[in-house]
Image (cartoon, rainbow, N blue to C red):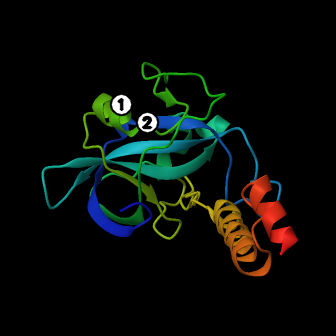
């Protein structure tokens, strides 16, 4: 289900907000091939109580600058009441080798998306949605921060199939073009005397 678009209706619980960071703004204009925008910000993760069932999920509302990590600095974006948001389903994020083990659950800051532990800490289901830019709340975090990372195995396929092709060619050449060498010295002498 990862990267599947969904629309959900419910209410945010801002009292249990968490932050993942530091993260960069993927929508920063002027970002090129080697840049991903400005650093020093956070993704705001907020529990979201679904309207049509007794479940609460986690929603990545989007990116905020580091000086807006405190919810009091973005009061207009702390919407109350029922809202409808769109987003993309996400799975757990792998911890990169240089990232310290563990997260800072006590402070509400996380280094990577550890879905099981985040859900347990917030008391929600282990379901995570990245909110899209279209349904972002004005004055709140900037949605649309989904980083798509699909597996690219093309190089290993190239190596596999070219190696198999080379081995097949060598076997074909030895079988049909070049006769095999004599098996013993006696066979070689006998053939050369004929």
Quarter that holds the N terminus: bottom left
Q: Nearer the viewer, residue 194 or 16?
A: 194
Q: Nearer the viewer, residue 156 or 62?
A: 156
Residue at the image point whose x is 50% and y is 71% from the top: 134
Residue 166 is situated, as x and y percent measured from the top left of the image, at: 73, 69
**Residue density around tag 2, few if under 14, some if 14–19, many if 20 or more, within 10 Å:** some
For the residues labelled 2 and 1, say whether their Cβ atoms are less than 8 Å apart.
yes
Classify 126 as above or below 186: above
Residue 47 as seen in the image, left or right of residue 143: left
Residue 144 as seen in the image, left or right of residue 160: left
Q: Nearer the viewer, residue 47 or 156?
A: 156
Helix, strand, or loop for circle 2?
loop
Residue at the image point whose x is 69% and y is 70% from the top: 171
**Residue, disc 2:** 114
Seen as rendered, the residue at the extreme top is 106
Residue 134 as seen in the image, left or right of residue 47: right
**Residue density around tag 1, few if under 14, some if 14–19, many if 20 or more, within 10 Å:** some
Q: Which mark is residue 103?
A: none
Residue 172 is situated, as x and y percent measured from the top left of the image, at: 69, 76
Q: Nearer the viewer, residue 81 or 118?
A: 118
Residue 52 as seen in the image, left or right of residue 109: left
Classify 113 as above or below 25: above
**Residue, disc 1:** 117
Q: CA distance from mark 2 to mark 1?
A: 6 Å
């Amino acid at each position: 289900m990862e990267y599947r678009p969904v629309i959900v209706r419910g209410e945010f619980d801002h009292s249990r907000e968490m932050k993942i960071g530091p993260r960069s703004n993927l929508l920063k204009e002027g970002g090129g091939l080697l840049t991903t925008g400005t650093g020093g910000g956070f993704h705001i993760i907020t529990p979201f109580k679904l309207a049509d069932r007794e479940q609460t999920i986690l929603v990545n509302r989007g990116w905020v600058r580091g000086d807006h990590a405190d919810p009091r600095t973005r009061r207009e974006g702390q919407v109350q009441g029922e809202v409808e948001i769109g987003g993309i389903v996400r799975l757990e994020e792998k911890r990169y080798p240089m990232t310290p083990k563990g997260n800072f659950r006590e402070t509400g800051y996380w280094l990577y998306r550890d879905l099981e532990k985040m859900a347990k800490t917030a008391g929600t289901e282990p379901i995570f949605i990245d909110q899209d830019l279209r349904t972002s709340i004005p004055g709140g975090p900037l949605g649309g921060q989904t980083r798509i990372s699909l597996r690219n195995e093309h190089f290993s396929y190239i190596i596999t199939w070219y190696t198999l092709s080379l081995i097949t060619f060598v076997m074909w050449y030895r079988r049909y073009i070049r006769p095999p060498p004599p098996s013993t010295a006696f066979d070689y002498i006998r053939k050369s005397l004929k």
